[in-house]
Image (cartoon, rainbow, N blue to C red):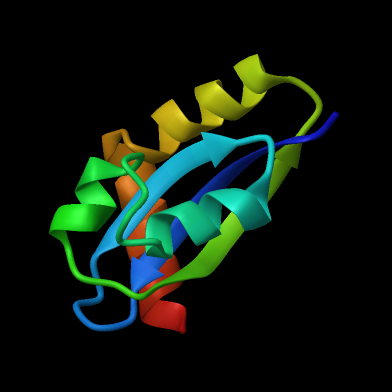
């Protein structure tokens, strides 16, 4: 089974969200579903959300580790640089 660390971006506000999942398509659908109770951050910040970036891992622990890295100072810097490139 594959696990993913992903970054989504709001099309309306440009806000960024980083998370991890084992089903990327389902998770993106949940972020964009106003009736889904999962994803409080993406519910209070307007979507729709689009997949901006993802990385694939063999274990959930590796995906969680990368998620934490991306949420750190250097990770946020990495994300900012990617946003500026697009």
In the depicted structure, whether residue 77 falls above or below residue 2: below
In the depicted structure, whether residue 77 falls above or below residue 3: below
The residue nearer to you, when weighing 75 against 42, is 42
Q: Residue lying at the far right in this picture: please name it.
A: 1
Q: Which residue occupies 61% across, 28% down?
A: 63
Query: Residue 19 at what x, y percent from top left?
Result: 45, 40
Left or right: residue 64 compared with residue 56: left
Q: Residue lying at the far front in this picture: please name it.
A: 35
Query: Residue 54 at what x, y percent from top left?
Result: 61, 54
Query: Residue 38 at what x, y percent from top left?
Result: 36, 39
Left or right: residue 69 compared with residue 66: left
Report how many numbered discs are placed on residues in the image. 0
Q: Quadrant of residue 72?
A: top left
- Which corner quadrant holds the N terminus? top right
Q: Which residue occupies 40% across, 46% down?
A: 18
Q: Which residue occupies 66% across, 21% down?
A: 60
Q: Which residue occupies 52% across, 58% down?
A: 28
Q: Quadrant of residue 40?
A: top left
Query: Residue 76 at what x, y percent from top left?
Result: 31, 48
Q: Residue lying at the far top in this picture: please name it.
A: 61
In the depicted structure, whether residue 66 falls above or below residue 54: above
Left or right: residue 60 compared with residue 17: right
The residue nearer to you, when weighing 7 against 79, is 7
């Amino acid at each position: 089974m594959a696990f993913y660390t992903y970054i989504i971006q709001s099309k309306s506000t440009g806000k960024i969200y980083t998370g991890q999942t084992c089903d990327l398509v389902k998770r993106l659908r949940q972020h964009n579903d106003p009736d889904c109770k999962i994803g409080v951050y993406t519910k209070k910040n307007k979507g729709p959300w689009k997949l901006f970036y993802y990385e694939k891992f063999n274990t959930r622990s590796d995906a969680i580790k990368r998620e934490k890295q991306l949420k750190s100072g250097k990770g946020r810097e990495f994300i900012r640089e990617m946003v500026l490139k697009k």
